[in-house]
């Protein structure tokens, strides 16, 4: 791989790492570059996933205090995300590249809708839950259901499991999907769930990268290691500083960036 190509990947990796920390979907910058360099889609996804793993490491370090405050409620989400990521990465190894053309636009549209209509969806879900609990006599202040963190909600955990399959399969735009799900089922702002999103992205990317590396050495699944290294260096730097930048963003700006990134992702899928 030529030095100029590696420099471009380093720069794109840095920008992608910062975007990943703030809203996710930084891979929408690096994946097109990899494929523009002539790397086949499946190989590009594996190469990108291993490299972008380092952006999520940087993001989690930047959000370590916020993650620590939530740690008691995260085990179900983390375990579910890990299982989904492993399944999704295995699916990539055995599925045709053409399948990406169908799956990706659908999931990006779903994620975009969840972000745009989060408040309405959350209100509807909360009203339905209140009616169900009232009918079952579980709205008393001391009930277990009332005290349970929304991060342990079966609906949230199940939705994240499905989203993590996609994350392990493709990785690009997974952050938008995670933010949409977390915001909808917890009723919290995008900024307040960003730390959890970054942790789950790290879990998913780590599991998927592990599967791809094992597959590389066992069955010869191709990974372009020079490209991976260039992306990784930039992603680690961008992820760390992007996490600090994201904490300063107002809710409207964070939501607006998510919408713009998602629309760009859709345009790139159809053009």
Image: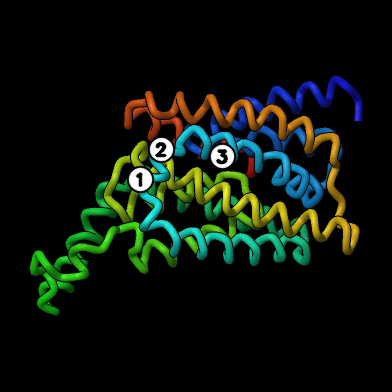
Instruction: Say what secondary structure mark 2 lies in.
Output: helix
Residue 58 position, x and y percent, is 58, 34
Residue 14 in the figure: left or right of residue 108: right
Task: Tell me, for residue 69, which label it has, or none.
Answer: 1
Q: Which of 92 and 217 is in front in this view?
A: 217
The span from disc 2 to disc 1 (Cα, nearest Å) is 6 Å
The answer to whether 125 appears left or right of 269 in the picture is left
Q: Do the residues labelled 2 and 3 touch (CB within 8 Å)?
A: no
For this view, does 36 lie left or right of residue 161? right
Bin the neighbour count of mark 2 within 10 Å (Cα to Cα): few under 14, some 14-19, many 20 and up. few
- Give me the residue at 32% from left, 32% from top: 251
* Residue lying furthest bottom: 136
Residue placed at 90% from the left, 58% from the top?
220
What's the distance in space between the residues labelled 2 and 3, CA to CA? 23 Å
Q: Which of marks 3 and 1 is nearer the N terminus?
A: 3
Residue 63 position (above or below residue 152): above
Q: Is residue 258 left or right of residue 139?
A: right
Residue at 72 percent of width and 60 percent of height: 92
Mark seen at residue 23: none
Q: Residues within 10 Å of mark 1 (few under 14, many from 20)?
A: few
Tag 2 and tag 1, C-beta contact below 8 Å: yes
**Of residues 231 and 121, which is closer to you in this image?**
231
Q: Identify residue for label 2.
A: 65
Tell me where residue 68 appears, x and y as whole percent: 40, 45
Q: Name the residue carrying label 3.
A: 25
């Amino acid at each position: 791989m030529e030095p100029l190509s590696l420099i471009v990947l380093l720069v794109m990796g840095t920008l992608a790492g910062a975007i990943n920390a703030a809203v996710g979907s930084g891979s929408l910058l690096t994946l097109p570059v990899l494929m523009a360099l002539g790397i086949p889609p499946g190989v590009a996804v594996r190469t990108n996933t291993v490299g972008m793993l380092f952006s999520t490491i940087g993001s989690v370090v930047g959000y370590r205090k916020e993650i620590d405050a939530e740690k008691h409620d995260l085990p179900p989400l983390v375990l579910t995300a890990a299982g989904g990521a492993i399944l999704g990465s295995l699916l990539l190894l055995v599925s045709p590249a053409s399948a990406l053309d169908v799956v990706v636009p659908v999931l990006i549209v779903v994620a975009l809708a969840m972000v745009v209509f989060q408040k309405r969806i959350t209100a509807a879900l909360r009203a339905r839950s209140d009616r169900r609990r009232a009918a079952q006599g579980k709205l008393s202040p001391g009930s277990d259901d009332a005290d349970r963190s929304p991060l342990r909600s079966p609906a949230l955990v199940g939705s994240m499991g499905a989203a993590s399959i996609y994350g392990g399969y493709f990785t690009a735009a997974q952050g938008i999907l995670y933010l949409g799900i977390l915001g909808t089922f917890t009723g919290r702002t995008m900024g307040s769930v960003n730390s959890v999103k970054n942790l789950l992205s790290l879990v998913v990317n780590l599991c998927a990268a592990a599967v791809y590396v094992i597959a590389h050495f066992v069955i010869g699944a191709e990974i372009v290691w020079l490209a991976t290294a260039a992306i990784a260096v930039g992603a680690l730097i961008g992820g760390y500083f992007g996490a600090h930048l994201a904490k300063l963003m107002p809710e409207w700006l964070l939501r607006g960036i998510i919408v713009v990134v998602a629309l760009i992702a859709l345009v790139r899928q159809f053009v």
